[in-house]
Amino acid sequence: MLEHRAKLAVASFLLICGQAAAQTPVRIVVNADLGETSISKYIYGQFGEDLGRNIYDGFWTKAGTGQWHLRDDVIEALRRIQVPVLRWPGGCFADYYHWRDGIGPQGQRPKMVNTVWGGVTEDNSFGTHEYMELIQRLGADAFIVGNVGSGAVEEMSKWWEYLHAPTGSPLGDERAANGHPDPYTVRFWGVGNESWGCGGAMTPETYAENYKRYAEYLRGARPFRIASGPNTDDYAWTETMMKEAGWMIDGLDFHYYTVAGTWANKGRATEFTEQGWFAAMQKALRMDTLITRHATIMDRYDPAKRVWLIVGEWGMWHDPEPGSTPGFLYQQNTLRDAVVAGLHLNIFNSHADRVRMANIAQTINVLQSMILTQGDQMILTPTYWVFDLYKVHQDAMLLPLNIRSDAYTLDGQSVPAVSASASKDRDGRIHISLVNLDPNRGRTVQVDIRGQQVSGVSGRVLTAATMQAHNTFEQPNAVQPVDFHGARLSGGVLTVDLPSKSVVVVELR
Ligand code: AHR
């Protein structure tokens, strides 16, 4: 107890004496020969809900030809970041969607009003076959979320059967008549979305009973079955689901968003002060506590860690851009979003034994996007570039790491200034992702690499002159990574001059 108090006193002293802390290099020890857990590539997953201009006008367009088609430029950009999985059709939309409306000749499909998002009329031209073509062109795995909230067990079970039945069976023949004789492969299947809210407003007890019924009828080659998980800190949800249905669950889909302001007044994506920057960092860091607590509950029921904790929705949620349709959730994306993304991905990596998938919300034109489109133009956001930098962690071995960072302090509140994650790929290359949360001051980071000889270092950095820097259709390359020259090796110690408000990934050979 005394020792604990003494540590607290030292920490407070360092935080109060900003000058003292400023001169202390951040220290990191990477144990390059002690890795045990791989970082699942699915942590770098995406979410493409039928919301706003994500599907229609995002992935799917009439531009150029006048006929609906998948956008080649979008697919090429997403292939570059190696999208491993794309969650679809929702989100809240999933519990409103009836899959039969989205198959058959496109001109004959019933139109629908998307009452969940924006009240717009859609022609259902993007449905099951179009999604599966997109998945195949991305080189990703499919993650379909079925309708529990307003759909029947039979409806979900038949969607699964339609996708997978061989020809010669009624649903297999129907799929063949619609242009795809070979069964599709859908690896991940969500049984409803946010069943505590827009997916049916159920108690965990009611949802657990429903989950078992719906999951049971996903027959034949069983999918990886994903249950709707907790909202933020609803630990009772996790407890009930693991206790009542854990043996039938392969993944539990937990959601947490970073809102710099309040839910009623979230704040603008591009117009914020340092208080808005700091609040975003502080709230993003909460992800670590939430995962730790949910994972602790899961450990009690599943010590072997068979069940994946999936962070199926995460990212920064701002007020919609002025002039956009409020229900479309269209927002810009600045260096602040990029730093928050790097921080989250480091947190997910550090929980790689339990967090085996995450899906940032969302891919195009919605919330913390990778891509923004305008007509046939497309820009890549700062967040896209973080996913590009971090793709080296996909399926690499997580390396245990200890970090001692000084604080970034504002108005008497503090967060650790530097976040880090390290992994080793199949070729023995070590990658370290570093994030400096402090918008005012760079840090010198000293990294001891133990357990492996390294002789060369290179890297890339994402930063900008201001916290609010972002890409526009007029200036699409204002924020993008460049080669990093602030890292040097000497006798197994790596020294990195980490710029303020930056994300850096270094490679050691
Ligand atoms: O991502 C936007 C919405 O946020 C999703 O539809 C829903 O699941 C969540 O509440």
Image (cartoon, helix red, strand yellow):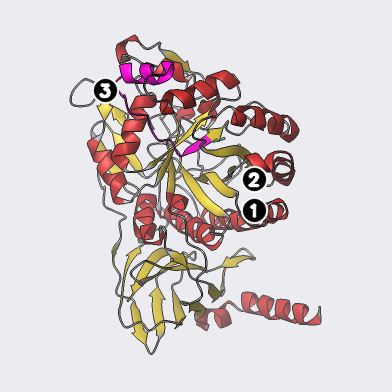
Rounded to the nearest angstrom, the CA distance separating label 2 from label 3 is 38 Å
Residue linked to disc 3: 68
What SS does tag 2 mark? loop
**449 or 340, which is in the foreground?**
449
Q: Quadrant of residue 363?
A: top left
Tag 2 and tag 3, C-beta contact below 8 Å: no
Q: Is residue 327 magenta?
A: no
Q: Earlier in the sequence, mark 3 or mark 1?
A: 3
**In this view of the protein, can residue 66 be seen by the observer?**
yes
Which label was assigned to residue 290? 1
In the figure, 87 relative to 394: above or below? above
In which of the image's four quarters is ligand 1 placed?
A: top right
Q: Residue type at mark 3: give it.
A: Trp
Instruction: Indicate yes or no: mark 1 CB to ligand 1 under 8 Å.
Output: no
What SS does tag 3 mark? loop
Name the residue rendered at 28%, 38% in the picture: 137
Name the residue rendered at 38%, 84% in the picture: 453
Residue sticking out furthest to the right: 1
Mark 3 surroundings within 10 Å by alpha-carbon count, few (fewer than 14), some (14 through 19), many (20 or more): some
> Looking at the picture, how far across and down is residue 371, in whole percent?
34, 42
Tag 2 and tag 1, C-beta contact below 8 Å: yes
Question: What span is in magenta?
Answer: 168-189
